[in-house]
Amino acid sequence: PGISKKLPDLLNHNEVEALLNSTHGLEVYDLRDRAILETMYASGLRISEAAALQMNDLHLTEGFVSVMGKGSKRRLVPLGEAACAACERYIRESRMVLASHSSQLDDSLFLSRNGEGMSRQAIWQMIKKRALQAGIARSIRPHMLRHSFATHLLEGGADLRSVQMMLGHSDLATTEIYTHVDQSMLRRQIENAHPRGARKKR
């Protein structure tokens, strides 16, 4: 018998919205964190890929980001309007302030309080902190934004091959796990809402 794959944990639409809204302030770190979260959710980046982004990887006029993925394979991923706006504002109002905290120029897109490129651990800590501020009680992992990106795309009607390209999967079978997530959601909706659903209270 085939070995069943564990379905990935992900954030629902309300949780994503709450997480993004936790950065609604106008402080330097609010603008930076908003840009990071919007970029990761809009493009399905791994946390290591987000940390490795350089200034010249971001193409706001064209609306895409150039990502160095696993195996040193580069891919182009579209950025949504919200992510582009968040990055543009961060670069304009926040990044220069953070860059001034270091004596050396760092071309990393997302900077720490020391003016240096953020590590994946620093981004992880930021996401956990913002999740608490958003009132999300369960444990949050950065990869959940990537899972949410893929699942929400498929729910919205995106084709599997396009999602595969944006995620940087070499094998389509790796991306197919998200179709199972989508099917499980549909099953739960039927069970909860249909008059003859298994979980419908009589």
Image (tube, rainbow, N blue to C red):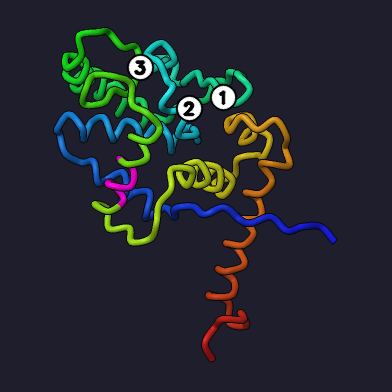
Work out which quarter of the rendered image holds the C terminus and state it.
bottom right
Task: Provide residue 33's location: percent of width, then percent of height.
Answer: 28, 34
Instruction: Say which amino acid is labelled 2.
Output: Glu
Identify whether 177 is placed above or below 196: above
In the rendered image, which residue does mark 2 sit on? Answer: 49
Residue plotted at (31% across, 12% down): 106
Range of the magenta residues? Answer: 126-131
Q: Helix or strand or loop: what does disc 1 sit on?
A: loop
Determine whether label 1 and label 2 are within 8 Å by CB. yes
Separation (CA) of disc 1 from disc 2: 6 Å
Main SS class of the magenta portion in the image? helix
Residue plotted at (33% across, 61% down): 137
Instruction: Say which amino acid is labelled 1.
Output: Gly
Q: Is residue 27 left or right of residue 126?
A: left
Task: Provide residue 138's location: percent of width, then percent of height.
Answer: 38, 60
Nearest to N terminus: mark 1 or mark 3: 1
Separation (CA) of disc 1 from disc 3: 16 Å
Q: Helix or strand or loop: what does disc 3 sit on?
A: loop
The label number, if any, that marks residue 108 in the structure image: 3
Q: Is residue 96 left or right of residue 73?
A: left
Asked if residue 195 lies in the magenta stretch, the reply is: no
Work out which quarter of the rendered image holds the N terminus and state it.
bottom right
